[in-house]
Image (spheres, rainbow, N blue to C red):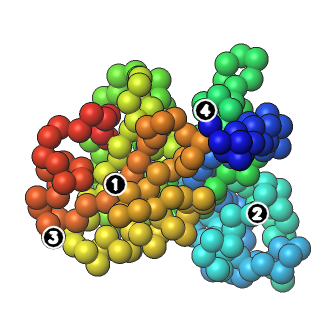
């Protein structure tokens, strides 16, 4: 091995042996944001940073949801943040409905675990705050993901979402696929390959934009996303995109029509 290559390898191994560089957050959370009390429906609230929020309609469970005025601006908000309006103040409540991943050990190429063998939670997971219309699907997925992770039976093999337009079905479905590939990168010795099948090329392009906006440090080539990157196992989980505009591409990944040697979800 050339000296420069050996030095580079030793430098990489040394860096991976230091906690600050050895462990990397590779995780995602789906959250529900609500208020501790009641605010006028549709009222604008403000937190200490000047960020604006909109109080939603009280649900059947008696809980009032809240969303940030700017989509995605709520992801840095923490439990207990005070939100004020002219008539009073309330605090923000956060509920993690579904979570995937943890801290990835780049040296062992596996999840970092505590003394009990449980995964160590990520310090800075990717957060997605859901709309109320997406809560039921997210709760179903949390249980389904847990069963898949533990390889336990589950009463459902297929999940189907029915709702009005603009309810967020495609978005939450996309998140489910990404989170499964993150949380369960391998099944035995085989990598998970998760497929995203859209009805047309324009719809596929929309999926591209969403993935690139949400998933950090993603490697992307020919619409195949390697979700962990160079520190992953030799064969790592992938999310593949296919369009029904070309039905033959749905028969098998790549150009081969042979059955792929991977666990496909």
Q: How crowded is mark 1: few (under 14 residues within 10 Å), some or many (20 or more)?
A: some
Q: Is mark 3 on a helix, strand or loop?
A: loop
Which residue is the site of mark 4? Answer: 109
Which residue is the site of mark 2? Answer: 77
Measure how far apart labels 4 and 2 are at the Cα level. 31 Å
Please state which of residues 109 and 35 is positioned toward the viewer in this rendering: 109
Residue 41 visible to an observer of this rendering = no
Measure how far apart labels 2 and 3 are at the Cα level. 41 Å
Question: Tag 2 or tag 1, which sits nearer the N-term?
Answer: 2
Q: Residues within 10 Å of mark 2 (few under 14, many from 20)?
A: some
Which numbered tag is attached to residue 240?
Answer: 1
191 shown above or below 254: above
Please state which of residues 212 and 139 is positioned toward the viewer in this rendering: 212
Which residue is the site of mark 3? Answer: 245
Question: Tag 2 or tag 4, which sits nearer the N-term?
Answer: 2
Q: Residue at x 78, y 54 (%)?
A: 79
* Viewer-nearest of discs 1 and 2: 1
Q: Residue at x 35, y 74 (%)?
A: 205
Q: How crowded is mark 4: few (under 14 residues within 10 Å), some or many (20 or more)?
A: some
Position in image of residue 167 (x %, y %): 40, 68
Q: Is mark 2 on a helix, strand or loop?
A: loop
Residue lying furthest right: 48
Position in image of residue 248 (x %, y %): 11, 58
Q: Is residue 185 left or right of residue 71?
A: left
């Amino acid at each position: 091995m050339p000296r420069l290559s050996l030095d580079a390898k030793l430098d990489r191994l040394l860096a991976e042996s230091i906690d600050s560089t050895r462990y990397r957050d590779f995780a995602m959370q789906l959250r529900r944001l609500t208020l501790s009390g009641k605010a006028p429906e549709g009222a604008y609230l403000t937190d200490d940073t000047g960020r604006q929020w909109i109080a939603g309609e009280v649900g059947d469970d008696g809980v009032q949801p809240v969303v940030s005025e700017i989509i995605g601006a709520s992801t840095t908000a923490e439990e207990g943040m005070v939100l004020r309006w002219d008539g009073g103040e309330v605090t923000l409540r956060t509920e993690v409905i579904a979570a995937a991943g943890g801290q990835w050990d780049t040296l062992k190429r596996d999840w970092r675990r505590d003394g009990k063998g449980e995964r160590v939670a990520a310090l800075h997971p990717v957060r997605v705050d859901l709309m109320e219309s997406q809560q039921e699907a997210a709760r179903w997925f949390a249980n389904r993901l847990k069963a898949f992770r533990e390889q336990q039976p589950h009463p459902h093999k297929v999940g189907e979402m029915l709702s009005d337009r603009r309810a967020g079905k495609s978005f939450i479905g996309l998140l489910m696929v990404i989170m499964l590939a993150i949380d369960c990168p391998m099944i035995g010795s085989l990598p998970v390959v998760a497929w995203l099948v859209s009805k047309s090329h324009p719809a596929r392009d929309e999926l591209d934009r969403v993935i690139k906006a949400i998933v950090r440090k993603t490697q992307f080539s020919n619409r195949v996303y390697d979700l962990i990157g160079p520190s992953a196992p030799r064969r790592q989980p992938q999310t593949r995109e296919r369009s029904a505009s070309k039905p033959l591409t749905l028969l098998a990944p790549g150009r081969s029509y042979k059955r792929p040697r991977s666990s496909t979800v």
